Amino acid sequence: MVPFDLPLLQNRFNISFEACTNKEAKESIALDSEEHFVYLLKRFGEGLNTSNRSVIGSLFIKRYGALIAGGLYLWTHHQIGIDMSVEKVKITVNGSGLNFHIADPTQFNPVKSIHDPNRKNDLYIGHLLSENVHPVFANTVHLTGIRESNLWATLSYLLAYWKKEWIKQAESSDNRKHIENVFRAMSEQNKPEWFPGKAANPIISRFRSVDDPLHEGQHILLRAKCCLNYRLPGEDRYCYTCPLISDEKRIEKYLAAHASEQKPIPAQGKP
């Protein structure tokens, strides 16, 4: 029995540690070669119904970020550092989404023998960034022409979102402190081995926000850069977190997306 919630990883982060079904095994795509990566992006673009390479690259990373978030969830909540090297991961395209399969969910070996929590933290963060994020970003930029800064902005937003959610839901002060330490290290440290070829840490830690009209005291984080979802076929494909729209339009879209959370106005004369 694994010491964490497998259905949660599947439902929230699209990660499976179980053996693929025959259909999934046939359709799963490895990240271990440029040929496979080209095929993966082609399939993903078909699911999005677009051939625009920049849009495909941007939205691929927007979906791919769930894998990194899932790895961080296990690290921040269970102190389990799954080996996320790209050769361990296979992906199936599910319409406009991605499902991740890790057939051999072993722990990242270097952290096993380390006892200092700060050192363990640095090792695992470095593993995620240098042995997963870096090669995937490099291939995405090379094959689609999307600016790498856009990809870091997309991942940074996802990290900021989950940091806020996990701190809000933390079950103990120790868990909250560990979450804060992990995200502080990721966004504030600049270790050359974490960000190959970078002169500075590219993770964005501060985002503009607007008041949440449905939840008093809460805020809606806004993206630093557009994810290009608006370029997909169809009308008004802007996200309510998009930096390109007005705040008036943003609130309008937010309320429409959360219509089920709004209380109906009582009919006149009724309590």
Image (spheres, rainbow, N blue to C red):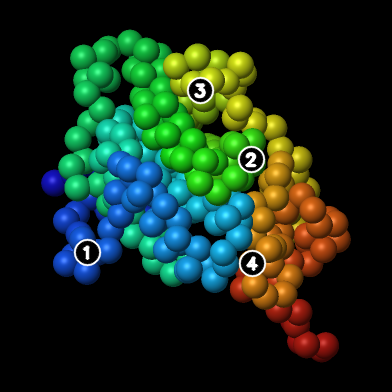
Q: Secondary structure at mark 4?
A: loop
Of residues 203 and 172, the one drawn nearer to the viewer in this rendering: 203
Do the CB atoms of the residues marked 2 and 1 lie less than 8 Å apart? no
Q: Position of residue 143 (x, y in %)?
A: 51, 46
Q: Secondary structure at mark 2?
A: loop
Task: Tell me which label, 2 or 1, sits earlier in the chain.
Answer: 1
Task: Tell me which label, 4 or 2, sits earlier in the chain.
Answer: 2
- How packed mark 2 is, by other alpha carbons closer than 10 Å (few <14, some 14-19, many 20 or more), is some
- How packed mark 1 is, by other alpha carbons closer than 10 Å (few <14, some 14-19, many 20 or more), is few
Q: Residue at x 81, y 57 (%)?
A: 245
> In this figure, which residue is indicated by the disc labeled 1?
26
> In this figure, which residue is indicated by the disc labeled 3?
195
**Separation of marks 3 and 2 at Cα, in angstroms:** 16 Å
> In this figure, which residue is indicated by the disc labeled 2?
147
> In this figure, which residue is indicated by the disc labeled 4?
232
Residue type marked 3: Phe
- Left-right relation of 237 to 198: right
Task: Tell me which label, 3 or 2, sits earlier in the chain.
Answer: 2
